[in-house]
Amino acid sequence: MTAKPDPIRPTDDQARALARDLLASARSAALAVILPEGGPMVTRVAFGLSPERAPLTLISSLAAHTTALQANPAASLLVGEPGAKGDPLTHPRLTLLAQASFIAHDHPDYEKMAAHYLRDHPKAKLYIGFADFSFARFSVSQGLLNGGFGRAFRLTPADMGLPV
């Protein structure tokens, strides 16, 4: 039997730059979690990078995805939007495999993170101070970049300019 060729290309500078651009420009992401009952769930969340470039979102403790992350911090985030024309699968996207941790209002970094987050998400000013909101910061273990048809890469956090 003939072995299938590996569809994953060696990571190069073009893939690294594309992943970093996707992260820098993303204002939302699809967040995948495992519900406490055991099933998967995907939702759309606001997306940003912390001052240290760690992926993060501002989420309410009332949301099902927050409860899921508190029970099991394993998560996956998908960034990258389809273009206005053409097949959506030809547009670049980046999947992040990560673990979530929470930063509440009383955390020493909260104010700095909030000010940074509001630069890209100014409408969050309406609810960022609500007691049920906190930041979920994601520690990324790897990225899976699909740069378009036939352009798949595995990336390390360092490849994407993320904290290690």
Image: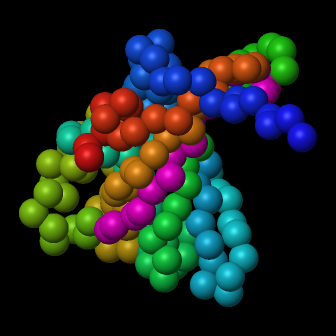
In magenta segment, residue 51 = no
Which of these two is toward me, 103 or 159? 159
- Residue 17 lies, in percent from the top left, at 42, 17
Overall secondary structure of the magenta stretch? strand
Relative to 18, 90 lies left or right: right
Inspect the magenta stretch and tell me whether residue 90 lies in it: yes
Q: What stretch is highlighted in magenta?
A: 88-102
| Residue 84 drawn at (x, y percent) | 75, 17
Residue 89 point in image, percent of width and height: 78, 27
| Residue 122 visible in the current orientation | no
On the picture, is 22 further left or further right than 130? Answer: right
Tell me if residue 110 can be seen.
yes
Asked if residue 13 is positioned above or below residue 154 in the image, the reply reads above
Q: How many marks can you see?
A: 0
* Residue at left offset 43%, top offset 22%: 16
From the viewer's perspective, tell me whether residue 100 is left or right of residue 11: left
Q: Is residue 69 left or right of residue 110?
A: right
Q: Which of 150 and 111 is in front in this view?
A: 150
Instruction: Say which quadrant the N terminus sits in.
Output: top right
Judged from this view, the residue extending furthest toward the right is 1
Question: Where 61 sits versus 54, above or below?
Answer: below
Residue at 46% x, 35% y is 155
Across and down, in percent, residue 124 comes to 39, 48
Q: Which residue lies furthest to the bottom in this view?
A: 37
Question: What sort of colour scheme is used for the picture?
Answer: rainbow
Q: Which of 141 and 79 lies nearest the eye of the viewer?
A: 141
Residue at (36% x, 30% y) in the render: 159
Residue at point 14%, 57% (across, down) = 109
Question: Which of these two is toward me, 37 or 85?
Answer: 37
